[in-house]
Image (cartoon, rainbow, N blue to C red):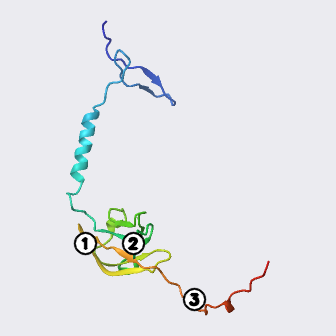
Amino acid sequence: MARRPLEREPIHLDGGRRTTQPMRDSLGRMPRAPTLKILALAVLMFLHTRPTAGQSPTPALVGSVTDTLGHPLGYSLITLLGQHGRQYQIAAHADGRYVFDSAPVFAFVPEGPYTLRVNYVGFAKAERDSVPLLRGKTVVVNFRLSPWNQTCDLACDDSNLPARHPR
């Protein structure tokens, strides 16, 4: 069976312009794109732009939040307080770990000392001063929060409680 040469089929679009469909072979198939070459080029570009192992272009701040017994306090609020009143906040993961590193906003955090504060409902807040952030360095700060004990200003006796009505 003889193969026909590649053909172009004319089509008309709105506006009266004339264009052609892509070329097809004699069996009606589209020619294959060089996908392997494109994929290899994309991988090479990714590897070229990636920082070397163990180095980060931004400062990284990691750690965990637990209670006094070592149980993780997931979703606790971690606040990084910087100079000139700037604040950066994240929530810890469910297992109590937190990571300030490659977030797009965190890439623009200037180097220097910061105050790190942790809040969790039902626990006393904790704070660390002078946490250094340096480009390419990872700082680990772990927190152990103690339960917050409420003290009431009223004397805790029955006279302050409303009277019970018998049924």
The amino acid type found where label 3 is placed reads Cys
Q: Residues within 10 Å of mark 3 (few under 14, many from 20)?
A: few
Residue 58 image point, x, y percent: 28, 65
Label located before the other in sequence (2 or 3): 2
Labels 2 and 3 touching (C-beta < 8 A): no
Residue 83, compared with residue 105, is above or below; it is below
Q: Quadrant of residue 2?
A: top left
Report how far apart the C-alphas of labels 1 and 3 lie in the structure.
45 Å
Between 120 and 70, the one lying in front of the other is 70
Mark on residue 152? Answer: 3
Which residue corresponds to the image point at 31% horizontal and 73% vertical from the top-left? 141
The amino acid type found where label 1 is placed reads Leu
Label located before the other in sequence (1 or 3): 1
Q: Residue furthest front?
A: 167
Q: Which residue is mark 1?
A: 134
Which residue corresponds to the image point at 36% horizontal and 17% vertical from the top-left? 7
In screen coordinates, is 145 left or right of 3?
Answer: right
Q: Which residue is mark 2?
A: 66
The amino acid type found where label 2 is placed reads Thr
Residue 122 image point, x, y percent: 50, 77
Report how far apart the C-alphas of labels 2 and 3 lie in the structure.
26 Å
